[in-house]
DNA sequence: TTCCGGCGGGTAATCGTTTTCCCGTAAAAC
DNA sequence: GTTTTACGGGAAAACGATTACCCGCCGGAA
């Protein structure tokens, strides 16, 4: 290509990148030659030379989970705006797989890593290793210790809003159906729930059912709750997947929502508005979370800056699954 | 690292890769040195030298669509099994964005490309360009002309099964709510619907509502159908998203499913089993599709082999949204 | 006329691997 | 005892870009 333009390789590079002035004549010739030959710079070579791949790695516990899907979508979109691409990995809720995927991404020299660690303790080594070599931000969940920046939602606030709402609507006995506290969000939401209930005289914890953040867990919990013959006034779910499964099974059992029991979820996945009745839930501002994460990835000027935690406030979306 | 092991760089490389024999002694020393220094081969350099990045690009119209999510998940999983990673892009249903993303992936020297082209005609240039430089397979949708391999479901068969089922259950007047025929699946499913109905004496097309593959389109169609005051016996939807929206709106309008009208979908996204009533739908064998796609990506031995089309058969999953 | 500065262009080093080619040695063949 | 053969190891070229460094030319100033 440079030869075709009749200049040296160096000059061609400069003409295209514009990182040094060239005569208009040369610029023109190079431009034309590039177009004629349909020249495309080899980004691999650029990466090797420039020590920057413009690729960001991302590891989530499950691509299939609608909440993570939303996050992936938002991050991908923000990244595309700055000419970067997303290398996506699924850890399948397994810290061992997660560690392998992180390692693979690091070997690929990603410029940054966004990770939702599946386990608050077992994921520590992987996250730490990542943080040692590239800008890393944890999203949604985080591991123990101040290892990296984190961006997520203020779970305490979200759960509080939900519990307050349920109590306002007259609920006295409230159950919690959430995730097993291996992941940080599961634990934090459970603790926030306990505190929120304890802070309200007259409100008590009717039951706790801890499993994974899945539809299936919601269904199981609903069956158990129903079988116990002693339904609570309201049920707060650890996320919407659980709530969706729970609603489904309650309806199948003939339980009326919200007349017999109110149900609230967490996340506000797209489907929450489509359940029957539509689900009251705590909405995570996903686009904002993604934007913050991408910003943190790009902007760590002070290398030894202490890790920061950005907790944006969620908002309660009141629909028909909680009694008026 | 080689110096630490007391051998040349070449020997170290050979010892680690095992692509040529080395003495056990040397192998040992290199191994140890690598571990002590925590050596990680730089995959960028490997890619530059070996002309293979072990990265596969993927472009889908919308990451958020549950069906594409399933596909992405399955492809990612299959890829991970062979040490490759997935560079994921969202074209946002826009051929212009799609073209840019494809170009970006090609510049990154991806080893292969999986694409669900958003438009059967407008996406042609992008797909063709991709096919010129890397193994490319179209998934689900395809563009006009025999440009690349394709793997997807046998839409004709799926629609036929659905129509046959509806007719068997007594439906005479059947409506179709699908996607606008810019994408190939939308068109093919519509045509298959027309043929299937025409092939059955006594069965007629009650209405056609074409829009996009979204929940919102389903809702709109339901409102229109209901407003017309003349509901068909059954409604076949172009995909499950549409069906989900439609079901929701029908219920809101007090229409009973399947007593007043039967509804069937296409894809069998996870949520189809959770609607009320659970949705009868045509199931796409997503894992199988993904596996085929990855196989095609890897195994094109004859370079000038004519493009192949792999249409796997879907199966009808009968749930409660169609009358018994 | 001479010197100097600036500017535009070229040469070559560099990024970190893999692989080709060559060389020396030791074992095998005669 | 000599010649081949095989094999393990090293030097260096390549992959395709960016960039540090150098050099020649031209204009202006002394």
Image: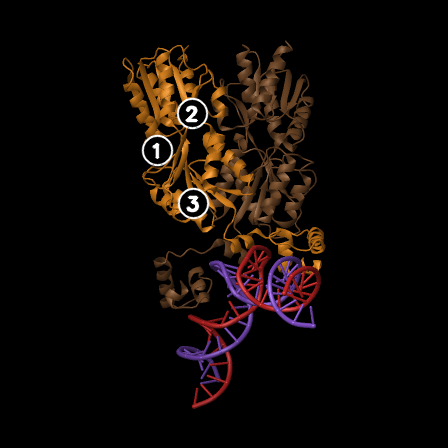
Chain colours: A orange, B brown, C purple, D red
Q: Percent position (x, y) of residue A151?
A: 41, 34
Q: Percent position (x, y) of residue A122?
A: 33, 41
- To which chain does the residue with label 1 belong? A
Mark 2 or mark 1: whose residue is earlier in sequence: 1
Residue A87's tag is none
Residue plotted at (65% across, 25% down): B193
Quadrant assignment, res A156: top left
In the rendered image of this protein, does residue B173 appear above or below residue B307?
above
Q: Residues within 10 Å of mark 3 (few under 14, many from 20)?
A: many
Q: Nearer the viewer, mark 2 or mark 1?
A: 2
Q: Percent position (x, y) of residue B198?
A: 69, 22
Which one is in front, B176 or A167?
A: A167
Give the left or right position of residue A81, taking residue B180 as reference.
Answer: left
Residue A233, can we see it?
A: yes
Q: Percent position (x, y) of residue A291?
A: 49, 34
Q: Which residue is denoted by mark 2 in the rendering?
A: A314
Are discs 2 and 1 both within one chain? Answer: yes
* Element type where label 3 sits in the image: helix
- To which chain does the residue with label 3 belong? A
Mark 3 or mark 2: whose residue is earlier in sequence: 3
Q: Are marks 2 and 1 in contact (CB under 8 Å)?
A: no
In the rendered image of this protein, does residue B284 appear above or below residue A131?
above
Q: Which residue is denoted by mark 1 in the rendering?
A: A184
* Element type where label 2 sits in the image: loop
Residue plotted at (53% across, 18% down): B321
Residue A101's tag is 3
Residue B232, can we see it?
A: no
Give the left or right position of residue A125, taking residue B186 as reference.
Answer: left
Quadrant assignment, res B99: top right
Q: Nearer the viewer, mark 1 or mark 3?
A: 1
């Amino acid at each position: 290509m440079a030869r075709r333009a009749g200049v040296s390789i160096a000059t061609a590079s400069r003409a295209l990148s514009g990182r040094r002035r060239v005569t208009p004549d040369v610029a023109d010739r190079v431009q034309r030659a590039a177009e004629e030959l349909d020249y495309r710079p080899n980004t691999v070579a650029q990466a090797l030379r420039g020590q920057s791949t413009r690729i960001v790695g991302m590891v989530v516990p499950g691509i299939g989970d609608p909440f993570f899907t939303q996050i992936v979508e938002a991050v991908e979109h923000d990244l595309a705006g700055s000419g970067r691409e997303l290398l996506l990995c699924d850890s399948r809720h397994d810290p061992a797989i997660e560690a392998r995927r992180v390692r693979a991404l690091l070997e690929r020299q990603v410029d940054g890593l966004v990770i939702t660690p599946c386990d608050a303790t077992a994921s520590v080594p992987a996250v730490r290793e990542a943080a040692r070599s590239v800008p890393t931000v944890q999203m949604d969940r985080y591991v123990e210790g101040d290892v990296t920046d984190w961006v997520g939602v203020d779970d305490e606030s979200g759960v509080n809003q939900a519990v307050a709402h349920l109590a306002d609507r007259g609920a006295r006995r409230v159950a919690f159906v959430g995730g097993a506290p291996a992941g940080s969000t599961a634990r934090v939401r459970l603790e926030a729930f306990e505190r929120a209930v304890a802070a309200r005289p007259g409100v008590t914890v009717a039951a706790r059912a801890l499993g994974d953040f899945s539809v299936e867990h919601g269904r199981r919990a609903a069956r158990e709750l129903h079988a116990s013959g002693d339904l609570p006034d309201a049920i707060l779910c650890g996320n919407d997947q659980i709530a969706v499964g729970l609603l489904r099974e309650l309806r199948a059992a003939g339980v009326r929502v919200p007349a017999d029991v109110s149900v609230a979820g967490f996340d506000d996945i797209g489907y929450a508005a489509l359940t029957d009745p539509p689900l009251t839930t705590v909405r995570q501002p996903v686009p904002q979370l993604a934007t913050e994460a991408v910003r943190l990835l790009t902007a760590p000027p002070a290398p030894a800056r202490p890790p920061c935690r950005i907790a944006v406030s969620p908002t309660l979306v009141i629909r028909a699954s909680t009694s008026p």
